[in-house]
Image (cartoon, rainbow, N blue to C red):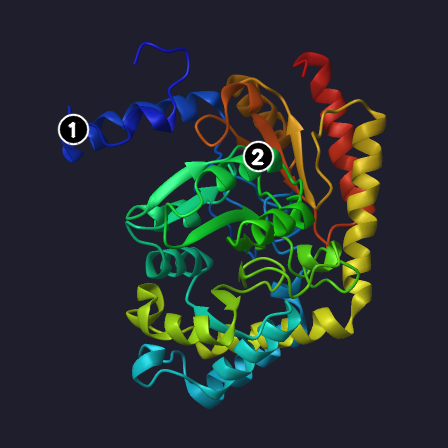
């Protein structure tokens, strides 16, 4: 490991070390991060996670851009009250898997509500968004099937593909996908294209209408993980399909309640028959305790607010558009982002940590994203904008970046 910068890639499983040796050697990575003077991971908070936080190492509040609670639902009195009432009625947990008795009436209400919201026939809930993607894919794809995946889909999806065939199709490479699907007609039982609606690192969108057309042309299923799109994108906040006016045209939509809903848990929404099948074969649902009553009720209330309080989403987009305008005016590279996720490109791993450190000195908490999460030349700061941010905070961020750029060019 004779490199200038040690990365997490250096400590992945290899045939040359056992886990004890590997975990001991991993200390060198921890030591390196301490030398950078910027704690980027496992930062402890003393408050809720949102636009303003109290974190370890700071006496007062910091402005934070690390949360995915885009609409501020985790801190709204309505969602808190709904969760408290559910605890009082049902207790602190469902205490069983849904298939064997842990299936509450509010679970059914949330399934029906989220399915209708994203334009599908039915839905099934999972204890996490990760479990939704992984459990779905393990249930429907085997050795005689294939997944054609965008290069930037989430790890939760790729983790469910271990037992099947996989082909990478690049990022939004529609023409290449068209060629591959034509060439491989009749070779596999189930063919599934997997994309995100909004990509979590670049903040750009899938070319959903083109994917739909190509999949229909080749009789191939399309799955879209819309974790970062639901509640944010589209005229009514119904996600990327709403944005493109394609509701009801995607075979499978997955998502999470940990972002725009401000809770935790996930779902798969699809045809009634496929959901019925998943109720018996999606291992991360069948063999896992159900979503807690509090999370379910709070998610239900968040779904209601998303549909009845459009001014919350309007506030988010006022903030997003303001920050995009200011960063662009000042010449910062934010890639192709069109969402609430801003990749501020630095393109140097060490500089990312140095800039994050300087921001923390100014009481601004931003995530640095480096290799292997992204390629070295794509190292960046990742800024998530929330409805709960104030314009003054966004301007403070831009001012701080301008100051830092004078001593650390990027």
Q: Where is mark 1, residue-wise?
A: 21
Q: Which mark is residue 196?
A: none
Q: Residue at x 46, y 59 (%)?
A: 129
What residue do we see at 83% from left, 50% from top? Answer: 318
Image quadrant occupied by the N terminus: top left
Question: 218 or 92, which is in the foreground?
Answer: 218
Tally of marks: 2
| Residue 52 at x, y percent in the picture | 66, 50
Quick one: 126 or 177, which is closer to the camera? 177
Element class at badge 1? helix
Q: Which mark is residue 171?
A: 2
- Residue 385 point in image, percent of width and height: 70, 46
Residue 53 seen in the figure: no
Mark 1 and 2 residues: CB-CB less than 8 Å, in contact? no
Q: Nearer the viewer, mark 1 or mark 2?
A: 2
Q: Dot 2 surroundings within 10 Å: few (below 14), some, or many (20 or more)?
A: some
288 and 143: which is toward the camera: 143
| Residue under the image location 74 percent in, 54 percent down | 244
Q: Is residue 249 at least partly visible in the picture? A: yes
Q: Position of residue 408 (x, y in %)?
A: 65, 14
Q: Residue 85 placed where, x, y %?
A: 54, 85
User: What whole-number distance in Å separates the C-alpha atoms at marks 1 and 2?
Assistant: 37 Å
Q: Quick one: quadrant of the C terminus?
A: top right
Badge 1 density bin: few <14, some 14–19, many ≥20, Cα 10 Å: few
Up-down relation of residue 233 to residue 73 (above or below): above
Q: Determine which quarter of the picture holds residue 306.
A: bottom right
Disc on the earlier residue, 1 or 2: 1
Q: Quadrant of residue 300?
A: bottom right
219 horizontally vs 90: left or right: right
Residue that appears at 50% across and 24% down: 375
In-image side of 114 versus 246 (left or right) = left
The answer to which quarter of the image holds residue 403 is top right
């Amino acid at each position: 490991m004779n490199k200038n910068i040690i990365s997490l890639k250096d400590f992945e499983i290899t045939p040359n070390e056992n886990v004890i040796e590997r975990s001991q050697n991993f200390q060198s990575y921890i030591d390196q991060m301490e030398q950078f003077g910027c704690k980027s991971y496992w930062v402890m908070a003393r408050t809720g996670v949102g636009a303003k936080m109290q974190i370890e190492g700071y006496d007062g509040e910091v402005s934070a851009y690390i949360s995915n609670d885009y609409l501020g639902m985790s801190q709204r009195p309505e969602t808190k009250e709904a969760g408290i009432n559910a605890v009082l009625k049902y207790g602190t947990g469902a205490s069983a898997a849904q298939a064997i008795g842990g299936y509450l009436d509010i679970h059914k209400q949330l399934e029906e509500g989220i399915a209708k919201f994203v334009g599908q026939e039915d839905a099934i809930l999972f204890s996490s968004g990760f479990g939704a993607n992984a459990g779905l894919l393990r249930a429907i794809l085997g050795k005689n099937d294939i997944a054609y995946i965008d290069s930037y889909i989430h790890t939760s999806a790729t983790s469910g593909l271990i037992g099947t065939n996989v082909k990478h199709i690049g990022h939004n490479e529609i023409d290449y996908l068209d060629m591959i699907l034509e060439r491989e007609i009749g070779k596999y039982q189930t063919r599934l294209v997997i994309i995100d609606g909004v990509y979590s690192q670049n903040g750009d969108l899938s070319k959903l209408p083109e994917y739909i057309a190509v999949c229909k042309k080749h009789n191939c299923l399309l799955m879209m993980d819309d974790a970062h799109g639901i509640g944010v994108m589209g005229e009514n906040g119904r996600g990327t399909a709403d944005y493109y006016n394609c509701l009801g045209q995607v075979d499978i939509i997955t998502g999470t309640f940990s972002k725009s809903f401000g809770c935790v848990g996930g779902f798969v929404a699809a045809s009634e028959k496929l959901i019925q099948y998943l109720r018996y074969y999606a291992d991360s649902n069948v063999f896992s305790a159900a979503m807690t009553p509090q999370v379910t009720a709070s998610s239900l209330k968040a779904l209601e607010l998303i549909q009845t309080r459009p001014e919350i989403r309007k506030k988010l987009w006022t903030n997003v558009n303001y920050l995009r305008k200011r960063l662009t005016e000042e010449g910062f590279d934010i890639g192709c982002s069109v969402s609430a996720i801003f990749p501020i490109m630095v393109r140097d791993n060490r500089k990312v940590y140095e800039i994050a450190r300087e921001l923390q000195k100014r009481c601004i908490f931003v995530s640095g994203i480096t290799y292997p999460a992204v390629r070295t030349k794509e190292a960046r700061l990742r800024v998530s904008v929330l409805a709960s941010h104030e314009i003054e905070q966004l301007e403070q961020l831009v001012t701080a970046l301008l100051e830092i750029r004078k001593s650390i060019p990027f």
